C-alpha cells in the first residue's frame, strides 16, 4: 500500500501511516493477528479523527433536526462518519469469518486496502486545509484567553 497524502494535521498523518503499515503487514502475512492489528489501528484512528472533526469542523447546531432545512456541515459529518462505520463493519465481519489459524483471503485484504485508500482520498482529503486552520485558530484563541487570565 502506497504512502497516503498528508491531511495537514501531524497526528492524523501519523495514524494514517500506522494503519498503512498494519495493512502492509496484513498483505505480507495474511494472518488473523495482522487483521486484528489493522482493526485496532483503524478503530483508534477513526475515534480520534471523529473527536477532532466534531470539535473543530463539524459543529453544526442542527443535529437531531433542531434546525429545519439542508445543513451541508451535518451532511458532511454524517457521510464521513458513516463511511468509517462501513469500513469497521467490513473489518469486523472479516475478523469474525476467519479461523484463528486460517489465512485471510487475498480479495478480502485487497478490499480492506482499497476501502482505506479511497476513504482517505475522498473524505479525509476534504479536511486537509480546513481542519489544520480550525485547530490553529482554536489554539491561538486559547493562548489569548490564557494571556488575558494572567493579567
Ligand atoms: Fe475519515
Ligand atoms: Fe482518517
Image (cartoon, helix red, strand yellow):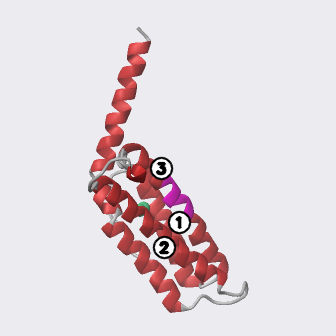
- Between the C-alphas of marks 2 and 1, the distance is 9 Å
In this rendering, the answer to whether 71 lies above or below 85 is above
Element class at badge 1: helix
**In this rendering, would 16 be left or right of 96?**
left
Q: Residues within 10 Å of mark 3 (few under 14, many from 20)?
A: few
Q: Which residue is mark 2?
A: 87
Q: Which residue is mark 1?
A: 42
- Give whichever of discs 2 and 1 has the lower sequence position: 1
Q: Quadrant of ligand 2?
A: bottom left
Q: Residue 74 colored magenta?
A: no
Q: Is residue 3 visible?
A: no
Which portion, as a residue range, is magenta? 42-48
Q: Residues within 10 Å of mark 1 (few under 14, many from 20)?
A: many
Asked whether disc 2 touches disc 1, contact meaning CB atoms under 8 Å apart, the reply is yes
Q: Residue at x 60, y 66 (%)?
A: 40
Q: x, y percentage for residue 99?
A: 71, 87
Q: Which residue is mark 3?
A: 51
Q: Residue at x 41, y 57 (%)?
A: 13
- Between the C-alphas of marks 1 and 3, the distance is 14 Å
Q: Residues within 10 Å of mark 2 (few under 14, many from 20)?
A: many
Amino acid at each position: 500500500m502506497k504512502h497516503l497524502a498528508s491531511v495537514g494535521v501531524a497526528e492524523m498523518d501519523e495514524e494514517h501511516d500506522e494503519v498503512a503499515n498494519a495493512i502492509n503487514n496484513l498483505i505480507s502475512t495474511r494472518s488473523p493477528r495482522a487483521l486484528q492489528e489493522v482493526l485496532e489501528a483503524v478503530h483508534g484512528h477513526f475515534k480520534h479523527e471523529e473527536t477532532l472533526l466534531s470539535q473543530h469542523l463539524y459543529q453544526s447546531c442542527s443535529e437531531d433536526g433542531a434546525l429545519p432545512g439542508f445543513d451541508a456541515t451535518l451532511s458532511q459529518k454524517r457521510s464521513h462518519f458513516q463511511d468509517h462505520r462501513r469500513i469497521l463493519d467490513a473489518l469486523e465481519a472479516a475478523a469474525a469469518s476467519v479461523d484463528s489459524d486460517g489465512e485471510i483471503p487475498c480479495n478480502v485484504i485487497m478490499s480492506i486496502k482499497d476501502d482505506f485508500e479511497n476513504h482517505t482520498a475522498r473524505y479525509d482529503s476534504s479536511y486537509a486545509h480546513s481542519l489544520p486552520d480550525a485547530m490553529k485558530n482554536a489554539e491561538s484563541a486559547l493562548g489569548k484567553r490564557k494571556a488575558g487570565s494572567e493579567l
